[in-house]
Image: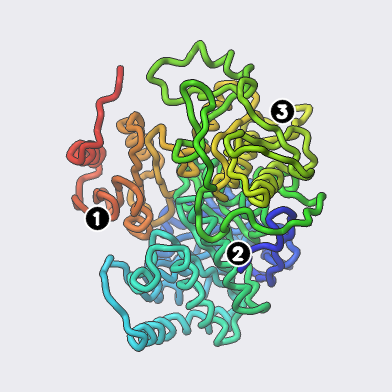
Amino acid sequence: MRYCESPYFFHRRKSREIVIGDPANGGVTGGGNHPVIVQSMITCDTMDTAACVQQTLDLVAVGCQIVRITAPTVKDAANLQNIVAELRQRGVNVPIVADIHFKPEAAMEAVKWVEVIRVNPGNYADTKKFAIKEYSNEQYAAELQRIEEKFTPLVLECKRLKRALRIGTNHGSLSDRIMNRYGDSPLGMVESALEFARICRKHDFHNFKFSMKSSNPKVMIECYRLLVARLEQEGADWNYPIHLGVTEAGEGEDGRIKSAIGIGSLLCDGLGDTIRVSLTEDSPHEIPVCRDLLSLIPKLANRKVQIADAQFPFDPFHFEKRETPEIELNENVKCGGEQLIRVVVTRATFDKVAPKIRPKDDVKPEAVYEDLNIAEIDPTQEFEINCDTQLVTVKDGVNLPAITAFRLLAAMLKRLRRRNPVLLKDCINFESVPPAPNIALLQAGVVVGSLLADGIGDAILVRGESGAGQSLRLAYNILQAAGCRSFKTDYVACPSCGRTLFNLQTVTARIKARTEHLKGVKIAIMGCIVNGPGEMADADFGYVGGAPNKINLYVGKTPIKFNIPEAEAVERLVDLIKEHGKWVEPEA
């Protein structure tokens, strides 16, 4: 199987077109040769028509091309008529997506008024109670028949009304049926989506796209790669468009880095027809990040230099860190083998930050580049390495984008049967004017994060960010976002929508104020139960909206405490962390 034509040269995936609304009257056409479309989601109550209209106008003003609105009930779905009518009266024809979970009847109402219906195969006609059950082939076939009966009316109505569908699976809401057959896996996500796609095709309906979202960028990348490979296996006419996104990415720098890793890696490999950056911030903040990411791809993806060797230096469908021996970087720090991925800085950066480092600080330089015994290699040329214990990197000035150059280096080492540890760099060609901090952050996230997701890299060096302290912290944040190191509390926070049962930005800030000193603890903050229990599977603790002004607390994916008044919930979360031995008092 393969997910792209080459890991070394950019070929945009040839997807079929999807028509969203009337392209002659404000709608858009995605896929094919059309530019990647950017979209977002409003966060207010769907029954508040004025707020929904205003938030949609705010998104359109910053360049959002598709706007998603949640429709948790038939009543909410019916109010989409009023929202859309008000927007059209104001001359705004942006396509509207109704986000459906749990309620097929809400989808059947929403399809009357909006251009796109997003369904989640994990909960459209299935359940998630974390039940364990063995299905015989006959029982499984009966379940598929039941799902087809539930889903077919929507497919036929979309076809009649010329609507579009998004078949969007989420890592956090796979059904019990899928979990029992495929496990909590990328394969389960893909097969769940394909079941719904087959129903669409049975009725000759093709105006749909897929999404495979996870809060873990590595899982998200694997899912999309596997999806595209499976679609190619199914046949040439299964080339449906792809929507990219890292769900529950969080806020600020962390949310942007996670999105850069997941979305940027796939864009550089030619995948993606629409994108959304999901931030726990006001929705208009998402659109500039989408635009910045898209603007970076021509520079970060190899579109110029053809590479003859198209062999993959890594398994694209199962993450496995490249095997290397353990070596010393200096008398205090080792890398490779089972060691942590190390953070290297230049001498200039070290001289600026070293005087400010305290003994107990986690964010600190672990080696200085100029002091290393390192082989700088041009992977486009033949080279020899005489031992596996020599640290290697790509030589500055090589006429390739960094991702391509390091993948090629890994492939060349594999061909030579060498296991040398590799030092990753976020850039190997320097610009005369350093990029702005927001661009440097995304660039480093895409380059270093993509390679780490490939399993390549034993140490990293960030130089694109001109600020010494900022570049050091950025390196650590990339390692944390990629799941390679944990030096601070990790937060999985959803971006809010009309289902959210509390103010996510306020509550996230409140939880961070109490817990951000907890190194290595992962806390999920979920506005409702749609993805809550599932996305918290690898979190230590979860804070989930259970009802208006009521919070449920989880340990992993297990609910522990229910219906806690919101005013008490943060402190009860702290108590839960203490009960499980993960609490330490913050230092003065």
Task: Write the residue at 44% across / 71% down.
Answer: 121
Residue count near mark 2 (Cα–Cα under 10 Å), binned few <14, some 14–19, many ≥20 = many
Going by the numbered disc 3, the residue's amino acid type is Pro
Q: Earlier in the sequence, mark 1 or mark 3?
A: 3
Q: Earlier in the sequence, mark 1 or mark 2?
A: 2
Going by the numbered disc 1, the residue's amino acid type is Thr
Closest to the observer: 545 or 559? 559
Q: Quadrant of residue 5?
A: bottom right
Residue 123 image position (x, y, % from top left): 38, 69
Going by the numbered disc 2, the residue's amino acid type is Ile
Q: Quadrant of residue 506?
A: top left
Is 3 rendered above or below residue 443? below
For the N terminus, which image quadrant? Answer: bottom right
Q: Check disc 3 and report the residue beneath it.
A: 434
Is 43 rendered above or below residue 341? below
Residue 178 image position (x, y, % from top left): 38, 72
Q: What is the distance, in whole Å, between disc 1 and disc 3 at their CAs?
A: 47 Å
Q: Check disc 1 and report the residue beneath it.
A: 558
Relative to 404, is 362 on the left or the right? left
Q: Earlier in the sequence, mark 2 or mark 3?
A: 2
